[in-house]
Image: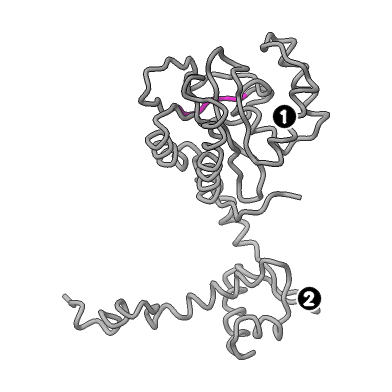
């Protein structure tokens, strides 16, 4: 059995922080793939981007073409191949938003001492997928599996931040007809426009008496909103100043979940 001292890629490599020599080809291959992010790249330009000779670049690219990670189109150059599409689809299928979000939700609940929710859009309702109770003695009636109005919950509003005004009005009308707490649309729309700018949303006792919350959206690899989180508490613990203070923390947690889901930080155009 070989020990660390007999391994040619042993302590010196680890301590220096450099990649083991055997991994250099792998890392260069990954660099080639990442160079395609903006579209097809000709060989000469690819070699310049990578800081490699044309012959080395061609050899790496050819190996990736053989494994279907890249394709080559005459006069255009190299681009992503079908294998990456297959792997991307499988990665997305294997990503469970509840599992990914759970440690972030627990950390947020511990930091705020308030109840934290995770939800997604289910047709015209916000579906609650997870709930971490807070440490305060407050009874928040939400349960996992509940479906709440989109337009009167902080979490629901966060799910709507990328929607357009006509869709907002449609959902607002549906919720009002279904018995959501009465509200004036012009006031609601004005608030939503502010939420869109800030990347968060509030529930100002609109869904449940004396309960307020701060929410923010979760995005998928393409930047599309696929979920939202919220921090909820009694109004006595959620005055205007504290809600404002919580915005950055809630938004940062939602962004961390989004990045763990594959989001690059870019919103869809």
Crowding around mark 1 (Cα neighbors within 10 Å: few <14, some 14 to 19, many 20+) is few
Residue at the image point whose x is 46% and y is 24% from the top: 237
Rendering coords of residue 64 (x, y %): 58, 74
Alpha carbon distance from label 2 to label 1: 47 Å
Identify which residue is drawn at 69% across, 32% down.
160
Q: Quadrant of residue 8?
A: bottom left
Residue 129 in the magenta stretch? The answer is yes
Extreme residue in the front direction: 241
Left/right of residue 12 with respect to residue 114 in the rendered view? left
Q: Residues within 10 Å of mark 2 (few under 14, many from 20)?
A: few
Which residue is tagged 2? 76
Tell me residue 120's x, y (percent).
59, 31
Q: Nearer the viewer, residue 86 or 27?
A: 27
190 versus 27 height, above or below: above
Residue 33 among magenta residues:
no
Q: Residue furthest right?
A: 166
First in sequence: mark 2 or mark 1? Answer: 2
Total marks placed: 2
User: Main SS type for the magenta part?
Assistant: strand
- Secondary structure beneath label 1: helix
In which quadrant is the N terminus drawn? bottom left
Q: Residue at x 63, y 29 (%)?
A: 121
* Residue 195 vs residue 146, the one in the foreground: 195
Where is residue 65? Give x, y as percent: 62, 73
Left-right relation of 163 to 105: right
The circle drawn on residue 191 is 1
70 is higher (above) or lower (below) than 206:
below
In depth, the one of 82 and 190 nearer the eye is: 190
Q: Which residues are magenta?
A: 126-131
| Disc assigned to residue 164 | none
Question: Residue 77: image x %, image y %?
Answer: 74, 77
């Amino acid at each position: 059995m070989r020990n660390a001292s007999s391994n040619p890629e042993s302590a010196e490599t680890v301590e220096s922080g450099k990649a083991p020599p055997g991994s250099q080809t792998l890392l260069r291959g990954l660099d080639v793939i990442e160079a395609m992010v903006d579209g097809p790249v000709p060989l000469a330009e690819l070699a310049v981007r990578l800081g490699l000779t044309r012959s080395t670049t061609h050899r790496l690219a050819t190996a990736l073409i053989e494994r279907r990670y890249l394709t080559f189109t005459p006069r255009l150059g190299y681009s992503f191949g079908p294998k990456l599409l297959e792997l991307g689809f499988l990665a997305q299928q294997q990503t469970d938003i509840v599992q990914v979000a759970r440690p972030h939700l627990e950390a947020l609940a511990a930091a705020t001492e308030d109840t934290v929710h995770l939800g997604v859009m289910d047709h015209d309702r916000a579906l609650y997928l997870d709930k971490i109770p807070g440490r305060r003695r407050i009874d928040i009636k939400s349960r996992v599996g509940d479906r709440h109005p989109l337009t009167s919950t902080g979490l629901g509003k966060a799910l709507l931040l990328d929607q357009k005004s006509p869709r907002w009005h449609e959902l607002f009308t549906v919720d009002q007809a279904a018995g959501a707490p009465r509200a004036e649309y012009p006031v609601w729309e004005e608030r939503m426009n502010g939420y869109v700018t800030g990347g968060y949303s509030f529930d100002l006792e609109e869904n449940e008496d004396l309960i307020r919350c701060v929410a923010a959206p979760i995005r998928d690899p393409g930047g599309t909103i696929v979920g939202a989180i919220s921090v909820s508490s009694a109004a006595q613990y959620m005055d205007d100043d504290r809600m404002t203070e919580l915005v950055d923390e809630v938004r940062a947690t939602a962004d961390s979940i989004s990045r763990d889901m594959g989001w690059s930080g870019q919103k869809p155009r």
